[in-house]
Image: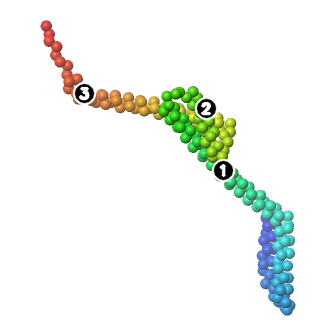
Amino acid sequence: MKQKLKMLAIATVAMVLTGPAVALAAASTSDPTEVSASILSAIGTALLGLLASPDALGIIFSGVVLGGGWLARRVWKDKAEARLRAFAQGVEHVYFAVESFALKTTNTIDDKLALALKLLNEQMARHGYKLTAQESEDAKLRFEALHGAGKAAAKQAVQTAAELAARGIATALPTVTALTTVPQTPRA
């Protein structure tokens, strides 16, 4: 393969170098259009001969296929990234919307997950996507993870507040003199 590419390169260089010689030889004729036509004909024949070889056709075909594949991958990847971004944002927005709605209403929501999936499906449809079964399962897992993270954060906040209150009470009690001194009781 390398040998054939070298031959192709050498033939191209030879054709370029011999072009002026062909022009000088053809200059002896009186008609300049005939000279340029003969030169263009010689160059065109040589290029077609080189490009029509099986190696050159293979290289051209490979370039076209690889270029088309690269372009298709580029377009597909951008669309896939946009879909994933819309899905991730949709899951978070819908989760917080359902939680906020549940806190503000007096009625209890029987199935927050079903409501969240319905809202997510509507939001994805607004972006032009249809929610697949795999994405629904992934959304359920993400909802559960967000719910667990919220519960853990609330528990941590309660524990931190209790610790701060205990420290505050412990530091404040010794400074209050009325609580630290016990009055003497009369003895009979």
Q: In this view, does 144 lie to the left or right of 64?
A: left
The reply to whether residue 149 is visible in this rendering is no
Q: What residue type is labelled 1?
A: Lys
Q: x, y percentage for residue 72?
A: 72, 54
Q: x, y percentage for residue 164?
A: 35, 32
Q: Which residue lies furthest to the front in this view?
A: 106
Task: Please state, as top left, top right, bottom left or bottom right, where the C terminus lies in the image.
Answer: top left
Mark 2, Cα crowd under 10 Å, few <14 / some 14-19 / many 20+, is few
Q: Residue shown at 19%/22% (left/top)?
A: 181
Mark 2 and mark 3: Cα distance apart in space: 55 Å
Q: Which amino acid does label 3 sit on?
A: Pro
Mark 1 touches mark 2? (CB < 8 Å):
no
- Which residue is denoted by mark 1 in the rendering? 79
Total residue callouts: 3
- Which residue is denoted by mark 2 in the rendering? 114
User: Image height check: is 105 above or below 42?
Assistant: above
Q: In this view, does 165 lie to the left or right of 33?
A: left
Q: Which amino acid does label 2 sit on?
A: Ala
Q: Residue shown at 70%/53% (left/top)?
A: 73
User: Image height check: is 3 above or below 142?
Assistant: below
Quarter holding residue 43: bottom right
Between circles 2 and 3, the one closer to the viewer is 2
Q: Residue shown at 82%/79% (left/top)?
A: 40
Mark toward the start of the polypeptide (2 vs 3): 2
Mark 1, Cα crowd under 10 Å, few <14 / some 14-19 / many 20+, is few
- Which residue is denoted by mark 3 in the rendering? 174
User: Image height check: is 185 above or below 145?
Assistant: above
Which element carries disc 1, helix, strand or loop?
A: helix
Q: Which of 12 and 27 is in front in this view?
A: 27
Q: Nearer the viewer, residue 125 or 10?
A: 125
